[in-house]
Amino acid sequence: MVAIQLLPQYGWVILVGIASCFLILWQGVQVGKMRKKFKITYPTMYSNDNTLFNCYQRAHQNTLENYPQFLMLLFIGGIHYPLVTAVAGLVWIVGKVSYSLGYYTGDPAKRMRGTYSYLGLLTMLGTSICFALNLLGVY
């Protein structure tokens, strides 16, 4: 049997997880503002003729599509490597803000400004893999 003990630094991981909730909330509010501005009502997901609205919506949807992986990797990798994983989580969050702000210009190519968010995600993937291998006695 393996007993997992959380280090005090795991608190940083939890705070990053909480910070990510504010990212999701902020993006949702931005989409809501655009819905109101362009009179795009629910349940319409995308507009047939409003590219700017679609850019706002895609920024939010892309983050939501990646959110389960982010949370899983954050909370698992953070068990064994809390500080590295917390910093990687912050990189992902800040990258998603850059991604969104680029998309919000209406030029989809500018979303690439936030590509560095994947550095955070890949780092968390690495810390999670290392933790799994450590549990298995391989690493």
Image (cartoon, rainbow, N blue to C red):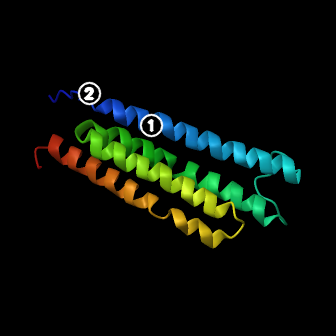
Give whichever of 105, 5 is nearer the camera: 105
Q: Quadrant of the N terminus?
A: top left
Residue of label 2? 8
The mark that comes first in sequence, 2 or 1, is 2
Label 2 vs label 1: CA separation?
A: 15 Å
Judge from the rendering whether residue 60 lies leftward or rightward of residue 4; answer left or right. Answer: right
Q: Tag 1's secondary structure?
A: helix
The quadrant holding residue 56 is bottom right
Q: Is residue 40 visible?
A: no
Q: Is residue 73 left or right of residue 135?
A: right
Residue at 26%, 27% (x, y): give it: 8
Q: Residue at horizontal 42%, vertical 33%?
A: 15
Do we see residue 65 in this rendering? Answer: yes
In the current view of this chain or complex, which residue is farthest to the right?
Answer: 39
Q: Nearer the viewer, mark 2 or mark 1?
A: 2
User: Which class describes the residues within 10 Å of circle 2: few (<14), some (14-19), or many (20+)?
Assistant: few
Q: Quadrant of residue 117?
A: bottom left
- The location of residue 85, given as percent across then percent down, is 32, 45
* Mark 1 lies on residue: 17
Q: Amino acid at mark 2?
A: Pro
Residue in the picture at 63% in, 39% down: 25
Q: Residue at x 76, y 63 (%)?
A: 52
Where residue 55 appears, x then y in whole percent?
70, 61
What's the residue type where badge 1 is placed? Gly
